[in-house]
Amino acid sequence: MADNRMRSKVLKMRSDVKIYGDIKIYAGSGNPPLAEKIAAYLGHQLSERSIIQFPNENIMVQLGESARGQDVYVIQTLSRPVHTNIMELLIMLQTLRLDSAGRITAVVPYLTYARSDKKDQPRVPITARLMADMIEVAGADRYMTLDLHAGQIQGFFSIPGDVLTAFHIITDYVEEKLPRMKDPVVVTADLGFAKKGRNFANDLNVPLALIEKRRSKRGDNTEALNLVGNVDGRDVILVDDEIDTAGSVSQAVTLLKKNGANDIILTCVHPVLSHPAIDRLESLPLKEIITTDTILIPDEYIKRLGSRLTILSIAPLLGEVILRAHEGRSVGEMFNE
């Protein structure tokens, strides 16, 4: 009897012991406002760190306090300046590993080089795989990211991770607009996005149309070729995962208007907005541009797009996933999976 009581006491003590310590949140310089929103959602302050760039462009990171044994989350989006942000992330991960952090999760809202996911030409790299390898080697135990350009990139990581989507955030926002729209139809900017576009259309319970396009051999130019579906006299919800130079969007909008589309709403998760995207978007006949804060949009761009631009925050999504990961609870439950 005494042995049973002792065994029960020991088991209870073990169950009360945390595998990892408290949450610590560090942020690179890629998107500080997003990191602050995530920390606020969790009721934490961002942990102190110093990032120093020397005159020779070398980067050094120093932590403000020990992270030994803690459950650490490093938030860094890999937008411009791309290679500076990559090195900041890798150096922060290694710094935390050398400081004996209990578990390190790389939270990368936007993963750069995601389009380089296969060898589609002779003698070219698969840089998305290289990114995954570097994040792991630098010291990450887990990773989190949103809306990868291609699903197979998940297979490049040999560490566990959560690949999330922000499309349900956009869907919820667009759904409120449907009663005021005229015969709405979802249109994907290219056939490669057809599956996600179908899911988007199903969630909104509206029809789907597709734009067929051909990409150049270098992969930097596209040409809208054909519209599959009917948009004549209808309001259009044009969806894509990211807007880079907005070349595809410009061609898509021209094709849609040529086929009789009424108002056009553009949605995307990642506002990369490389030159000359802002010039193109500013001149296009778009009623609204809906995106998220995975990437920090310059104030100048926000001012130029004015009331047509809507930025939805992913901070509550990432904050809740971080909390569930820390507590060992299911993330799939958030999406009824």
Image (spheres, rainbow, N blue to C red):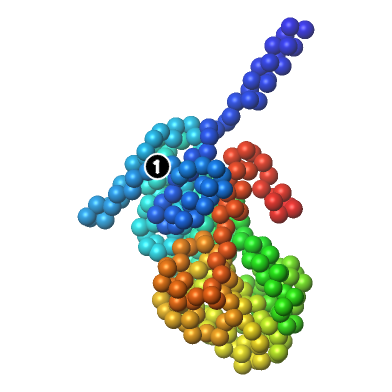
Q: Residue at x 68, y 15 (%)?
A: 9
Q: Residue at x 39, y 35 (%)?
A: 65
Quadrant of the drawing holding the N terminus? top right
- Residue 314 x/y as whole percent: 57, 58
- 117 horizontally vs 202: left or right: left
Quarter of the view holding residue 201: bottom right
- Residue 105 x/y as whole percent: 51, 45
Q: Residue at x 66, y 92 (%)?
A: 260
Residue 178 in sight from this viewpoint: yes
Q: Secondary structure at mark 1?
A: loop
Q: How many labels, in total?
A: 1
Q: Is residue 212 above or below residue 243?
A: below
Q: Which residue is mark 1?
A: 48
Q: Residue at x 53, y 32 (%)?
A: 21
Q: Residue furthest left?
A: 55
Amino acid residing under circle 1: Glu
- Residue 35 x/y as whole percent: 48, 52
Q: Is residue 302 above or below residue 155?
A: below
- Residue 126 x/y as whole percent: 47, 63
Quarter of the view holding residue 301: bottom left
Instruction: Categorize mark 1 by other alpha carbons within 10 Å: few (<14), some (14-19), many (20+).
Output: few
